[in-house]
Image (tube, rainbow, N blue to C red):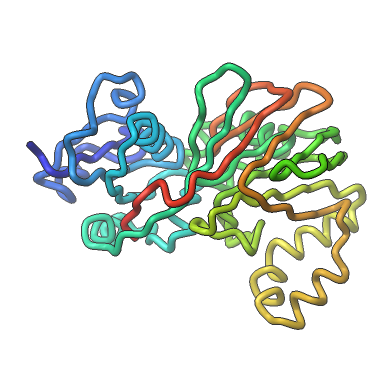
């Protein structure tokens, strides 16, 4: 029995490169795992070489089969959200070393449930509204050429943005009715470009965080962009900085919620994305955190 398997996306990394990095591992194409053509249960460690979508295929398999096999990550995708939040190097050789020799960390997993569909598990961020439209409109060929910057072009193609009304229920509390451009339900807080979207989000805190984003005017956008870039990174870590940011927050533009269970009901059909993959149009989706369900080498 081979002890290590590498599940990879051939569009992101070559077979030859993986063979040089992991000469004794068994190499498996991610689509084969997704289609149920290969089994992962006999391996003592799994290495995932690809983007967040490839990672989600492996996590989905582990969760559906009640496995807690340790995984390593070779982040060669567009966003690489989980790798960035765990501090895993984007350098392939260094990431390979971490995947095999890094310390094991137990992290939370998000679970999304849409109507009668099977649960969808995710490690990073799910989005409803504009965020999901951007993912839907982003050109895959452009992503391959220029990486996460392609999302900017996708954002332009997703315009004009429209506000949508949602009812948000956190841990069975009284539902909140909001009118926003996008909702982001996150297990992680940092985006590519060192954007601190949700500064207090942690991958192992037993909660999901929600960013409620709805700037109305250009000055609201300037405020939001300032907060999620340099302010959340440099000002919020300071005690007085946090108090100042909280005191001056415009909740209609950017608000944070947190809980173990999040239920979102939309007034109209809206687009859903999970870990960068468009899922389709939904009116209701429930999210739940599964604490410390995944073991990652980092």
Quarter of the figure with residue 172:
top right
Q: Is residue 250 left or right of residue 29?
A: right
Residue 274 in percent (x, y) is at: 56, 35
Q: In this view, does 179 lie to the left or right of 100?
A: right
Q: Locate the C terminus by quadrant.
A: bottom left
* Residue that lies at the very extreme toward the top in this rendered image: 116
- Residue, x 78% and y 48% (percent of image)? 213
Q: Which of 109 and 10 is in front in this view?
A: 109
Q: Which of 176 and 60 is in front in this view?
A: 176
- Residue, x 81% and y 69% (percent of image)? 246
Numbered disc total: 0
Residue 76 in percent (x, y) is at: 38, 46
Q: Is residue 147 visible in this depiction of the protein?
A: no
- Residue, x 63% and y 20% (percent of image)? 115
Q: Is residue 77 visible in this depiction of the protein?
A: yes
- Residue, x 64% and y 32% (percent of image)? 286
Residue 241 in percent (x, y) is at: 75, 79
Quarter of the figure with residue 104:
bottom left
Quarter of the figure with residue 262:
top right
Q: Which of 145 and 257 is in front in this view?
A: 257
**115 over 3 or under it: above or below:** above
Q: Locate the N terminus by quadrant.
A: top left
Residue 118 in percent (x, y) is at: 50, 22
Q: Which of 17 and 32 is in front in this view?
A: 32
Q: Is residue 98 left or right of residue 112?
A: left
């Amino acid at each position: 029995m081979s002890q290590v398997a590498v599940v990879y996306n051939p569009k992101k990394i070559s077979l030859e490169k993986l063979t040089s990095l992991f000469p004794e591992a068994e190499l498996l194409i991610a689509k084969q795992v997704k289609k149920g053509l290969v089994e992962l249960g006999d391996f003592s460690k799994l290495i995932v070489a690809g983007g967040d979508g490839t990672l989600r295929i492996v996590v989905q398999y582990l969760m559906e089969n009640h496995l807690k096999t340790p995984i390593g990550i070779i982040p060669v995708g567009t966003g690489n959200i989980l790798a960035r939040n765990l501090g895993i190097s984007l350098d392939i050789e260094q990431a390979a070393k971490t995947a095999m020799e890094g310390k094991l960390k137990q992290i939370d997993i998000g679970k999304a449930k849409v109507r009668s569909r099977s649960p969808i598990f995710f490690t990073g961020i799910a989005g409803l509204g504009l965020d999901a439209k951007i993912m839907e409109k982003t050109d895959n060929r452009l992503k391959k050429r220029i990486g996460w910057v392609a999302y900017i072009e996708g954002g332009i193609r997703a315009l004009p943005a429209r506000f949508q009304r949602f009812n948000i229920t956190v841990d069975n509390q009284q539902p909140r009715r909001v009118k926003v451009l996008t909702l982001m339900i996150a297990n992680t807080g940092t985006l590519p470009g060192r954007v601190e979207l949700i500064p207090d989000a942690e991958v192992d805190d037993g909660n999901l965080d929600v960013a409620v984003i709805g700037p109305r005017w250009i000055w609201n956008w300037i405020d939001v962009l300032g907060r999620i870039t340099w302010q959340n990174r440099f000002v919020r870590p300071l005690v007085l900085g946090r108090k100042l940011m909280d005191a001056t927050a415009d909740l209609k533009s950017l608000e944070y919620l947190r809980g173990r269970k999040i239920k979102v009901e939309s007034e109209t059909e809206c687009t859903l994305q999970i870990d960068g993959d468009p899922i389709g149009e939904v009116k209701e989706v429930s999210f739940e955190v599964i604490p410390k369900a995944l073991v990652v080498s980092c």
